[in-house]
């Protein structure tokens, strides 16, 4: 039985706390923490030692060379917003989860490739980075909640990972799965959600040139709260299609049951392509609030990426492509 709990998404977007308030609140909390400021320097040394021990071994690879093919029609979002106003339900249903997410251990991190592939395998994230064509891309990101940002993501084309996986001809979908560890991620103790977070795309979507596996952001490894060490970016779809902290990609024949579609299928469908003309049942999708500004700008169909992806959906008249 599904027990309904109030979720962030159930607020009309306009009623949600603007990200600037979160950022200020965090700054305040941090400043208060500085009250301990005069705590012995030994604490700094201990912290430095711990930082070193947990440092991301891929950090030296960044920044990746920017691919000039993908350009923006708006300024890049200030990282303080992109890194402090997050959706990551594993760590809570609020936007202010960055601190909680630091509990996630991102090394060792193994990604499993299985299902309909020539030979299932597991690969460590640092070995994967060595095999993939690394690049940076500027993409717009549009959340179903009607806010948006523009981010320099680092990573590699999902098509390159598909090629590495060697799927069989019978594979029709790629299912992406987030880690499962309720000791680290308290949101996963909320039994009314169907953990782990599952999303999925068709093979044609996975191999579309826009589908991008993200390992970094703003020229450095992607922060934990944004989905370290491996997440997706599917810029023509609402953000919930882009699973964070992925541990498994499965090549399958049946359309996967995805997290939000399972929770509330009449609001968050499988396809979730961006379309300003199709309102969410509880709010308009016509415009979006640009993170870090008070500006609302018109939302574009396919989030502006129609030239790359609209053809993927030709003839799919019976499907709810835009919710
Ligand atoms: N992936 C997991 N595992 N858990 C989540 O709650 N939220 C999604 C998506 N991926 C989510 C997730 C949603 S709704 C959005 S908008 C983006 O992550 C947010 O990414 P950001 O926090 O980096 O902006």
Image (spheres, rainbow, N blue to C red):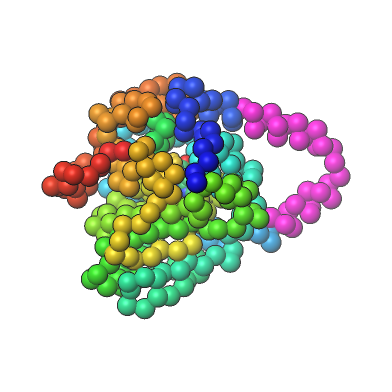
Q: Can the viewer see residue 160 in this picture? A: no
Foreground residue, 140 or 172?
172
Left or right: 192 as drawn, with respect to 242:
right
- Locate residue 283, reporting x and y percent: 37, 26
Residue positioned 33% across, 43% down in the render: 269
Q: Is residue 257 above or below residue 109?
A: above
Left or right: 239 as drawn, with respect to 59:
left
| Residue positioned most to the left | 315
Left or right: 293 as drawn, with respect to 280:
right
Left or right: 235 as drawn, with respect to 57:
left
Residue positioned 51% across, 67% down in the render: 110
Q: In this view, does 62 lie above or below 150?
A: below
Q: In this view, does 124 lie above or below 257?
A: below
Q: In this view, does 56 lie above or below 235?
A: below
Residue positioned 25% across, 41% down in the render: 320
Foreground residue, 171 or 289?
171
Residue positioned 50% across, 55% down in the render: 196
Quarter holding residue 49: bottom right
| Residue positioned most to the right | 40
Residues drawn in magenta: 24-51
Quarter holding residue 74: top left
Count of numbered marks = 0
| Residue positioned most to the front | 1
In the rendered image, residue 233 lying in the magenta stretch gets the answer no
Q: Can the viewer see residue 40 in this picture? A: yes
- Locate residue 170, reporting x and y percent: 24, 70
- Locate residue 7, reporting x and y percent: 52, 35
Q: Of helix, strand and loop, which mostly describes the magenta segment?
A: helix
- Locate residue 193, reporting x and y percent: 51, 47
**Which quadrant would the C terminus be assigned to in this image?**
top left
In the rendered image, residue 33 lying in the magenta stretch gets the answer yes
């Amino acid at each position: 039985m599904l027990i309904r709990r109030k979720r962030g998404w159930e607020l009309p977007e306009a009623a949600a706390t603007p990200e600037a308030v979160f950022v200020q609140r965090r700054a305040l909390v941090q400043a208060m923490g500085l009250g301990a400021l005069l705590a012995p320097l030994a604490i700094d040394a201990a912290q430095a030692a711990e930082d070193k021990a947990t440092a991301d071994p891929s950090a030296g690879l960044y920044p990746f060379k920017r691919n000039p093919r993908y350009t923006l029609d708006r300024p890049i979002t200030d990282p303080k917003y992109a890194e402090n106003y997050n959706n990551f339900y594993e760590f809570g249903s609020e936007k202010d989860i960055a601190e909680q997410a630091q509990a996630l251990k991102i090394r060792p991190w193994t990604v499993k490739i299985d299902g309909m592939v020539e030979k299932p395998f597991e690969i460590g994230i640092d070995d994967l980075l060595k095999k993939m064509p690394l690049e940076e891309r500027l993409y717009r990101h549009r959340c179903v909640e009607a806010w948006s940002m523009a981010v320099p993501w680092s990573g590699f084309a999902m098509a390159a990972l598909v090629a590495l996986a060697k799927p069989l001809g019978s594979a029709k979908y790629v299912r992406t799965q987030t880690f499962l560890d309720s000791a680290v991620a308290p949101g996963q103790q909320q039994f009314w959600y169907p953990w782990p977070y599952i999303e999925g795309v068709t093979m044609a979507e996975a191999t579309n040139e826009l589908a991008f596996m993200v390992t970094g952001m703003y020229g450095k490894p992607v922060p934990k709260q944004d989905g370290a060490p491996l997440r997706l970016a599917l810029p023509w779809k609402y953000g919930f299609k882009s699973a964070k902290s992925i541990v498994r990609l499965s090549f399958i024949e049946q359309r996967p049951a995805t997290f939000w579609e399972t929770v509330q299928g009449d609001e968050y469908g499988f396809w979730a392509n961006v379309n300003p003309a199709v309102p969410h049942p509880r709010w308009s999708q016509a415009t979006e609030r640009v993170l870090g500004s008070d500006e609302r700008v018109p939302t574009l169909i396919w989030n502006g990426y129609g030239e790359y992806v609209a053809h993927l959906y030709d003839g799919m008249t019976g499907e709810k492509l835009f919710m």
